[in-house]
């Protein structure tokens, strides 16, 4: 193991690797969780079932492509997504980018604790008649998730090895119980009012999980083969995310009243609901905090070498837990939403930089990024973020899918800026 614990700011040695299926289990932890089930419930209720299934699978395929491209870059360079940002945006430029990413992920760490506490409040009141204070649940869950991440990637690996299959089986059981509910026919379901159009369904599927696909290098840097990366992406997005969303959608259609927790309680699945809420939040937040530490180590490289990784993890986990108290996040979620939008265009910039501008040559990327700030990357980032915001508002659209518009807009801008820059540099060299 490296001096910084999990190769926070250095290339993963070629001799260090994880089996692809272990990485797939960790990445699938993002999908086998309450938020994915809730997304399935919400989408299935506002569209037809054929439209829901088609949009869900199309979104899963798009996420698989994004995750595969980003993961391959990570596997070939053996660098995390935050270290890749230093190559593409320049050393100082990446600090601003990674600081925004760290704030966003840390905020979502707190949001997940808050959502977990809200779910536990309902479950404790329904199952055991508990109506007392919920802050001990927030504090205890925050500490547990932080301590898991403190141990490092090996702890998250073992946690996902146990919990992800169990949560997947719990989701299967939820689907079977939902199908036991008397119904006239799932495929005949029609929403009240106008059905959500296909592009909006795909946008919701892709937009809700796109951040996880963008940070695929964080775990895929421990893989050696492109084929393994593709297998991880297929398992995490096309299979796991689609199945969990489908299970939530079927349950939401067959039990049309209430949210996901109320649906599970209505079907008598109290302990199953507890397991999905607790286990899903535990694994997802441990991975969120792990990515926060990777980002923080690139923003403050000197400090990260002086401070041990466990201390840095405890500090960030404590801060994220504090954010969950006192309703602070009620005023923070909109800010986090817009920060999350900033993640998505980075996928287009990194993949274009690696596959197009530098023709798969890692050494060429390193040489090109020795400047403190690579301005063309920031121009491309701004273009992609702007397109994403306009697409979310329905003002401008390229594909009808906001996340794809952001990636394509940023990627095309970056490619154009790169080729123009080369032309200008070439003419300057040829001048006598």
Image (cartoon, rainbow, N blue to C red):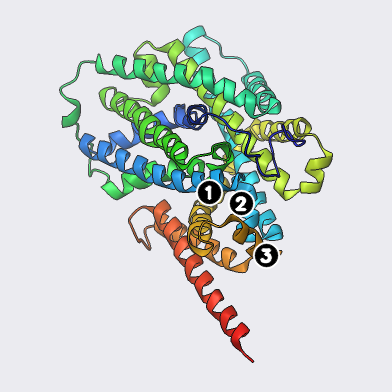
Q: Position of residue 95 (x, y in %)?
A: 69, 54
The answer to whether 202 is drawn above or below residue 370 in the figure is: above
- Farthest-out residue, right: 306
Lower position in the chain sequence, tag 3 or tag 1: 1
**Pointer 1 residue:** 73
Q: Residues within 10 Å of mark 1 (few under 14, many from 20)?
A: many
Q: Position of residue 54 (x, y in %)?
A: 25, 40
Residue drawn at point x = 66 percent, y = 24 percent = 148
Label disc, if present, on residue 373 of the rendered structure = 3
Lower position in the chain sequence, tag 2 or tag 1: 1
Q: Position of residue 163 (x, y in %)?
A: 51, 19
User: Cα distance, mark 2 to mark 1?
Assistant: 9 Å
Q: Residues within 10 Å of mark 2 (few under 14, many from 20)?
A: many
**Pointer 2 residue:** 84
Q: Quadrant of residue 234?
A: top left
The answer to whether 370 is drawn above or below residue 49 in the figure is: below
> For the residue labelled by badge 2, is the local secondary structure a helix, a strand or a loop?
helix
Residue drawn at point x = 48 percent, y = 22 percent = 164
The answer to whether 132 is drawn above or below residue 1 in the figure is: above
The reply to whether residue 112 is in sight is: yes
Residue drawn at point x = 23 percent, y = 36 percent = 191
> For the residue labelled by badge 3, is the local secondary structure a helix, a strand or a loop?
loop
Residue drawn at point x = 63 percent, y = 23 percent = 155
Q: Quadrant of residue 173?
A: top left
Depth order, front residue of 353/410: 353
Pointer 2 and pointer 1: residues touching (CB < 8 Å)? yes
In the image, which is nearer the foreground, mark 2 or mark 1?
1
Q: Quadrant of the C terminus?
A: bottom right
Q: Is 239 left, or right, of 102 in this rendering?
A: left
User: Cα distance, mark 3 to mark 1?
Assistant: 21 Å
């Amino acid at each position: 193991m490296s001096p910084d614990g999990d190769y926070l700011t250095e290339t993963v040695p070629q001799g260090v690797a994880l089996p692809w299926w272990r990485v797939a289990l960790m990445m699938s932890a993002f999908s086998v969780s309450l938020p994915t089930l809730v997304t399935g419930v919400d989408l299935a209720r506002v569209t037809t079932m054929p439209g829901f299934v088609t949009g869900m699978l199309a979104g899963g395929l798009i996420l698989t492509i994004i995750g595969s491209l980003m993961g391959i870059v990570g596997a070939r360079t053996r660098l995390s997504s935050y270290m890749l940002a230093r190559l593409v945006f320049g050393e100082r430029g990446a600090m601003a980018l990674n600081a925004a990413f760290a704030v966003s992920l840390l905020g979502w760490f707190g949001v997940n604790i808050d959502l977990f506490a809200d779910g536990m409040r309902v479950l404790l009141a329904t199952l055991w008649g508990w109506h007392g204070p919920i802050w001990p649940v927030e504090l205890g869950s925050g500490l547990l998730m932080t301590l898991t991440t403190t141990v490092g990637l090996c702890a998250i690996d073992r946690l996902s090895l146990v919990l992800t299959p169990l949560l997947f089986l719990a989701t299967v059981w939820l689907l079977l119980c939902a199908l036991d509910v008397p119904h006239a026919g799932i495929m005949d379901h029609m929403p009240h009012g106008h059905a959500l159009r296909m592009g909006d369904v795909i946008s919701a599927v892709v937009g809700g999980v796109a951040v996880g696909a963008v940070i695929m290098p964080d775990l895929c840097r421990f893989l050696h083969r492109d084929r393994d990366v593709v297998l991880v992406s297929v398992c995490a997005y096309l299979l796991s995310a689609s199945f969990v969303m489908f299970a939530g959608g079927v349950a939401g259609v067959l039990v049309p009243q209430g949210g996901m927790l109320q649906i599970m309680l209505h079907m008598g699945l109290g302990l199953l609901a507890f397991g999905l809420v607790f286990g899903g939040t535990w694994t997802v937040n441990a991975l969120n905090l792990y990515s926060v530490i990777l980002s923080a180590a690139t923003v403050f490289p000197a400090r990260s070498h002086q401070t041990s990784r466990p201390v840095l993890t405890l500090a960030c986990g404590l801060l994220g837990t504090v954010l969950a108290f006192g309703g602070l996040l009620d005023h923070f979620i909109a800010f986090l939403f817009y920060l999350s939008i900033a993640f998505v265009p980075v996928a287009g910039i990194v993949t274009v930089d690696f596959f197009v501008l530098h023709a798969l040559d890692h050494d060429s990327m390193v040489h090109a990024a020795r400047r403190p700030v690579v301005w063309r990357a920031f121009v491309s980032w701004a273009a992609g973020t702007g397109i994403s915001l306009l697409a979310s508002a329905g003002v401008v659209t390229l594909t009808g899918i906001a996340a794809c518009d952001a990636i394509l807009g940023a990627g095309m801008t970056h490619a154009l800026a790169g080729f123009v820059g080369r032309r200008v540099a070439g003419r300057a060299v040829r001048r006598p």
